[in-house]
Image (cartoon, rainbow, N blue to C red):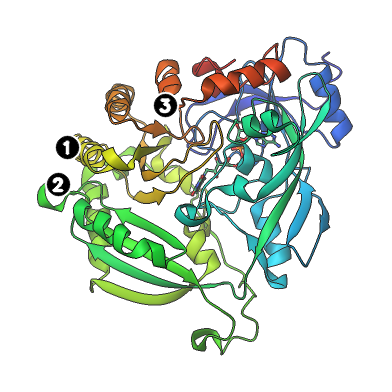
Amino acid sequence: MQNQWSAVNSGPLTGWGRYPVVAAKTVRPENWSAVDNYVKNANSDALIARGMGRSYGDASINDNGYTILLERFDRFISFDNNSGDLHLESGVTLDEIINVFALRGWFPAVVPGTKYVTVGGAIAADIHGKNHHRDGSFCNFVKAFTVIVASGERVLCSRQENSDLFWATVGGMGLTGIITDVHMTLKPIESVYVEKTEIKAKNLDAVMSLFDEHEKNYQYSVAWIDCLARGNDLGRSILMLGNSIAKGDERIKHLSNPLSLKEKRQIQVPIDSPDWLLNSFTMGTFNSLFYAKQMSNHHEGIADFESYFFPLDAIGSWNRLYGKRGFIQHQTVFPEETSREALKTLLTMSSENGWGSFLAVLKRFGPQDGWLSFPRPGYTLTLDIAVKDGLFEFLKELESVILNYGGRIYLAKDAFLSAEGFRKMYPRFNDWQKVKAKYDPKNTFSSHLSQRLEIR
Ligand SMILES: Cc1cc2nc3c(=O)[nH]c(=O)nc-3n(C[C@H](O)[C@H](O)[C@H](O)COP(=O)(O)OP(=O)(O)OC[C@H]3O[C@@H](n4cnc5c(N)ncnc54)[C@H](O)[C@@H]3O)c2cc1C
């Protein structure tokens, strides 16, 4: 067996949040037959796929077997310029898709806050973007994919064919097998520019009314929220709305090619931030300044896709800003009926106990159908929280509050959820588990996350 894993590296491995750190053995296969062999010879070793490692917590790490790095599988297979249908390997990143297809007038229909994710990772987490209320998640634009399941067999699945495996793999966090290639559809674009409108909201009630009022008229919507504000200011925010700009629009007429994205320079965070930088004073000051930066209550402008969709990609290794111990990104979604009260409770808990973050994000979701997909209709709140003493206890308390409001935590960002909490938050887990038992009876595909959540 050991010879089989010729290029094994051992060492500490983390997700993007740099917590938890596990001693992992990684392999980087060069071709698919090597992957086939790894799966066929896994015996009692647990395997998990890893794309760009942009999930925050422990979804793509494994201290109990091997983590299989898939970035080498980055080939485009075919493209239909009339329909936007793209067939590609699962290790292709959204960055690579954008680099090749934006100029031709095509773009991924759903993008997250970074373009450095693979298509395999995007399916396994069924990622969402700023347009979820209109378009749903990434997998709404995926027609079919092939999975290497535990027997070593390759199974092509879609909504029509082997649909049980399709729905268990969408949002299934790599636990049904390894996705090799994907048939997805890009959306046509006329420019790489967005007209954006930013509106200040004095508190949570105000921003929720603004979502109600404006959302239907915009493709994209998201609010930045000052999670350290209290009292009457609780939930004060800036709602950012956007629509794509058509090619003849006055505002981009001066451009020689409205589909051309300018090369952006990336600045790097060279060292881990010291802990003192992350106290509630510095974060409170940052949040207040961000809110005050926008002088008027209503601001309009244009932005290119790069700075609109991926502002954080301009800062390389920004995850070091949270210091050596790392951070977690905590994303929850609540049903429409409980959202208002739930968000007030969460924001109060985080501001009163000093667990706030530099940027908290509020967004509204529409319906979603993947069995373990995170989105559901309602509001979703994202908090970045530095790891420090007492965090585990705080998150335990938060988990029971979230459960009381019928909320759910996003697995692609999670590092702390309990096995019991997970089962309550994901009601279709039983259906999912039957498919897991059918295709992976020995639980070959397993990660630190699945072990923590007792998923097998
Ligand atoms: C700055 C930033 C912003 C983000 N914004 C958003 C956002 O707006 N919306 C959102 O939904 N998410 C967001 N994310 C999370 C990110 O989109 C997901 O975690 C995504 O899964 C990362 O893709 P990856 O290629 O890095 O996968 P990894 O992190 O390497 O893996 C994620 C999961 O996918 C599985 N996987 C990877 N490749 C395969 C494969 N070929 N076959 C089977 N399973 C596979 C892994 O086993 C793991 O369970 C953000 C992350 C960052 C760092």
Q: Which mark is residue 230?
A: 2
Q: Quadrant of the N terminus?
A: top right
Looking at marks 2 and 3 on the same chain, the residue that comes earlier in the sequence is marked by 2
Q: Amino acid at mark 3?
A: Met
Q: Quadrant of residue 168?
A: top right
Q: Nearer the viewer, residue 33 or 335?
A: 335
Image spot of residue 154 (x, y percent): 82, 29
Q: Amino acid at mark 2?
A: Arg
Q: Which mark is residue 425?
A: 3
SS state under label 1: helix
Image spot of residue 49 (x, y percent): 68, 31
Considering only vertical position in the picture, is 310 above or below 91?
Answer: below
- On the picture, is 129 further left or further right than 107? left
Q: Amino acid at mark 1?
A: Glu
Q: Residue furthest left?
A: 231
Give the residue number, with chain letter if any, for mark 1: 352
SS state under label 2: loop
Considering only vertical position in the picture, is 134 above or below 384?
Answer: below
Observer able to see residue 229: yes
Looking at marks 1 and 2 on the same chain, the residue that comes earlier in the sequence is marked by 2
Q: Residue furthest right?
A: 33
